[in-house]
Amino acid sequence: MVAYVVIPGIDGSDGQHWQTLWEREWGDGAVRISPASWFAPDLDDWVDAVQEAYDVASRRDSRVVLVAHSLGCWAAAAWLDRNPSTPVGGAFLVAPPDPHGPAFPSRSAATFVEVSARPLPCPALVVGSTDDPYCTPEAAAGFAARWEARWHLAGARGHINSASDLGSWPHGRELLDSLNG
Protein backbone atom coordinates (compact mmCIF):
# COMPACT_ATOMS: atom_id res chain seq x y z
CA MET A 1 0.00 0.00 0.00
CA VAL A 2 0.86 3.63 -0.46
CA ALA A 3 -0.26 6.64 1.56
CA TYR A 4 -0.69 9.88 -0.35
CA VAL A 5 -0.12 13.44 0.80
CA VAL A 6 -2.38 15.66 -1.32
CA ILE A 7 -0.96 19.16 -1.78
CA PRO A 8 -3.33 21.45 -3.74
CA GLY A 9 -2.65 24.95 -4.98
CA ILE A 10 -4.12 28.25 -3.77
CA ASP A 11 -7.58 27.85 -2.19
CA GLY A 12 -7.32 24.05 -2.25
CA SER A 13 -8.82 21.88 -4.97
CA ASP A 14 -12.60 22.02 -5.46
CA GLY A 15 -14.92 19.01 -5.68
CA GLN A 16 -14.41 18.53 -9.43
CA HIS A 17 -10.60 18.68 -9.33
CA TRP A 18 -8.76 15.43 -10.11
CA GLN A 19 -6.90 15.67 -6.76
CA THR A 20 -10.17 15.70 -4.84
CA LEU A 21 -11.60 12.84 -6.90
CA TRP A 22 -8.46 10.76 -6.32
CA GLU A 23 -8.48 11.61 -2.62
CA ARG A 24 -12.05 10.30 -2.37
CA GLU A 25 -11.00 7.05 -4.06
CA TRP A 26 -8.03 6.64 -1.72
CA GLY A 27 -10.13 7.26 1.40
CA ASP A 28 -8.00 6.83 4.53
CA GLY A 29 -4.97 6.30 2.30
CA ALA A 30 -4.80 10.04 1.57
CA VAL A 31 -4.13 13.08 3.74
CA ARG A 32 -4.72 16.59 2.39
CA ILE A 33 -2.63 19.45 3.73
CA SER A 34 -4.53 22.15 5.59
CA PRO A 35 -2.46 25.31 5.85
CA ALA A 36 -3.93 28.32 7.62
CA SER A 37 -2.97 30.48 4.63
CA TRP A 38 -4.95 28.95 1.74
CA PHE A 39 -5.91 32.35 0.29
CA ALA A 40 -2.70 34.30 0.99
CA PRO A 41 -0.16 31.47 0.84
CA ASP A 42 2.80 31.59 3.18
CA LEU A 43 5.58 29.16 2.23
CA ASP A 44 6.56 28.27 5.80
CA ASP A 45 2.92 27.63 6.74
CA TRP A 46 2.47 25.37 3.70
CA VAL A 47 5.71 23.48 4.41
CA ASP A 48 4.55 22.96 8.00
CA ALA A 49 1.21 21.68 6.66
CA VAL A 50 3.04 19.21 4.41
CA GLN A 51 4.97 18.00 7.46
CA GLU A 52 1.77 17.52 9.46
CA ALA A 53 0.11 15.60 6.61
CA TYR A 54 3.26 13.52 6.08
CA ASP A 55 3.33 12.60 9.77
CA VAL A 56 -0.26 11.32 9.57
CA ALA A 57 0.29 9.53 6.25
CA SER A 58 3.51 7.84 7.38
CA ARG A 59 1.68 6.34 10.34
CA ARG A 60 -0.76 4.75 7.89
CA ASP A 61 1.82 3.31 5.54
CA SER A 62 5.59 3.17 5.28
CA ARG A 63 5.55 4.38 1.65
CA VAL A 64 4.36 7.96 1.22
CA VAL A 65 3.93 9.71 -2.13
CA LEU A 66 3.36 13.46 -2.49
CA VAL A 67 0.67 14.45 -5.02
CA ALA A 68 0.96 18.18 -5.68
CA HIS A 69 -0.75 20.64 -8.00
CA SER A 70 0.16 24.20 -8.91
CA LEU A 71 1.59 26.18 -5.97
CA GLY A 72 1.52 22.91 -4.03
CA CYS A 73 4.42 21.73 -6.21
CA TRP A 74 6.61 24.44 -4.71
CA ALA A 75 5.45 23.61 -1.17
CA ALA A 76 6.29 19.95 -1.82
CA ALA A 77 9.71 20.82 -3.26
CA ALA A 78 10.50 23.17 -0.37
CA TRP A 79 9.46 20.52 2.18
CA LEU A 80 11.61 17.90 0.42
CA ASP A 81 14.54 20.33 0.32
CA ARG A 82 14.23 20.89 4.08
CA ASN A 83 13.79 17.15 4.81
CA PRO A 84 16.18 15.35 2.44
CA SER A 85 16.55 12.24 4.60
CA THR A 86 12.83 11.74 5.27
CA PRO A 87 11.68 8.64 3.36
CA VAL A 88 9.39 9.59 0.48
CA GLY A 89 8.36 7.15 -2.24
CA GLY A 90 7.92 9.85 -4.85
CA ALA A 91 6.66 13.29 -5.79
CA PHE A 92 4.00 13.77 -8.48
CA LEU A 93 4.19 17.48 -9.38
CA VAL A 94 1.48 18.76 -11.72
CA ALA A 95 1.39 22.22 -13.33
CA PRO A 96 3.99 24.06 -11.24
CA PRO A 97 3.53 27.79 -11.78
CA ASP A 98 6.48 29.92 -12.81
CA PRO A 99 7.23 32.22 -9.84
CA HIS A 100 8.78 34.71 -12.28
CA GLY A 101 6.05 34.44 -14.91
CA PRO A 102 3.60 37.27 -15.65
CA ALA A 103 0.54 35.38 -14.30
CA PHE A 104 2.10 34.32 -10.98
CA PRO A 105 0.13 35.76 -8.03
CA SER A 106 3.21 37.47 -6.62
CA ARG A 107 1.24 39.74 -4.27
CA SER A 108 -0.87 37.05 -2.64
CA ALA A 109 1.92 34.43 -2.69
CA ALA A 110 4.90 36.70 -2.07
CA THR A 111 6.82 34.15 0.04
CA PHE A 112 6.84 31.77 -2.94
CA VAL A 113 8.45 34.23 -5.35
CA GLU A 114 12.02 33.39 -4.36
CA VAL A 115 11.70 29.59 -4.44
CA SER A 116 14.18 27.73 -6.60
CA ALA A 117 14.21 24.26 -8.05
CA ARG A 118 16.97 22.05 -6.64
CA PRO A 119 17.47 18.28 -6.96
CA LEU A 120 14.78 16.34 -5.11
CA PRO A 121 15.78 13.46 -2.81
CA CYS A 122 13.17 11.06 -4.23
CA PRO A 123 11.84 9.90 -7.59
CA ALA A 124 9.71 12.64 -9.12
CA LEU A 125 7.57 13.31 -12.17
CA VAL A 126 6.60 16.79 -13.35
CA VAL A 127 3.55 17.09 -15.61
CA GLY A 128 2.93 20.24 -17.62
CA SER A 129 0.63 21.54 -20.31
CA THR A 130 1.28 23.28 -23.62
CA ASP A 131 -1.20 26.05 -22.76
CA ASP A 132 -0.86 26.53 -18.99
CA PRO A 133 -1.47 30.24 -18.32
CA TYR A 134 0.82 30.07 -15.26
CA CYS A 135 3.84 28.39 -16.82
CA THR A 136 5.29 27.81 -20.26
CA PRO A 137 6.23 24.23 -21.17
CA GLU A 138 9.85 25.35 -21.41
CA ALA A 139 9.85 26.75 -17.87
CA ALA A 140 8.14 23.61 -16.50
CA ALA A 141 10.66 21.39 -18.30
CA GLY A 142 13.42 23.52 -16.77
CA PHE A 143 11.98 22.99 -13.27
CA ALA A 144 11.83 19.24 -13.94
CA ALA A 145 15.48 19.24 -15.04
CA ARG A 146 16.62 21.18 -11.96
CA TRP A 147 14.50 18.93 -9.70
CA GLU A 148 16.10 15.94 -11.49
CA ALA A 149 12.59 14.70 -12.19
CA ARG A 150 11.06 12.98 -15.19
CA TRP A 151 9.17 15.38 -17.44
CA HIS A 152 5.84 14.74 -19.18
CA LEU A 153 4.02 17.19 -21.44
CA ALA A 154 0.30 16.34 -21.28
CA GLY A 155 -0.79 18.38 -24.30
CA ALA A 156 -3.21 21.31 -24.23
CA ARG A 157 -4.76 20.89 -20.77
CA GLY A 158 -4.64 24.46 -19.43
CA HIS A 159 -3.63 24.52 -15.77
CA ILE A 160 -4.57 20.83 -15.40
CA ASN A 161 -7.29 21.74 -12.92
CA SER A 162 -11.09 21.67 -12.68
CA ALA A 163 -11.42 24.11 -15.59
CA SER A 164 -9.55 21.55 -17.73
CA ASP A 165 -12.58 19.23 -17.36
CA LEU A 166 -10.43 16.14 -16.76
CA GLY A 167 -12.75 14.39 -14.33
CA SER A 168 -10.77 11.74 -12.48
CA TRP A 169 -7.98 12.17 -15.08
CA PRO A 170 -7.19 8.54 -15.98
CA HIS A 171 -4.03 9.56 -17.87
CA GLY A 172 -2.78 11.27 -14.71
CA ARG A 173 -3.38 8.10 -12.73
CA GLU A 174 -1.32 6.17 -15.28
CA LEU A 175 1.46 8.73 -14.86
CA LEU A 176 1.24 8.49 -11.07
CA ASP A 177 1.32 4.70 -11.30
CA SER A 178 4.46 4.93 -13.47
CA LEU A 179 6.09 6.89 -10.64
CA ASN A 180 4.96 4.31 -8.10
CA GLY A 181 6.10 1.50 -10.41
Image (spheres, grey):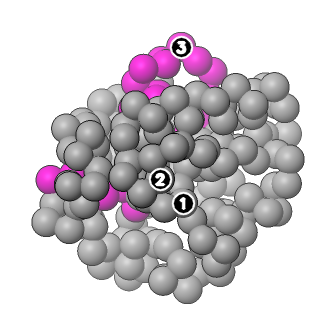
SS for dot 2 = loop
Q: Residues within 10 Å of mark 1 (few under 14, many from 20)?
A: many
**Quadrant in the picture for the C terminus:** top right
Does residue 143 sit above or below 94 in this rendering?
above
Q: Residues within 10 Å of mark 2 (few under 14, many from 20)?
A: some
Which portion, as a residue range, is magenta? 77-100
Upstream in sequence: badge 2 or badge 1: 1
Picture residue at 85% right of the left edge, 54% below the top: 27
Query: Horizontal placement of 7 versus 157: left or right?
Result: right
Residue 36 x/y as whole percent: 51, 44
Q: Nearer the viewer, residue 16 or 91?
A: 16
Q: Mark 1 highlights which residue?
A: 12
Of marks 1 and 3, the one in the foreground: 1
Picture residue at 75% right of the left edge, 34% below the top: 57
Q: Mark 2 highlights which residue?
A: 38
Which mark identifies residue 85?
Answer: 3
Upstream in sequence: badge 2 or badge 3: 2
Picture residue at 57% right of the left edge, 65% below the top: 13
| 2 and 3 marks in contact (CB < 8 Å) | no
For marks 1 and 3, give the CA distance: 27 Å
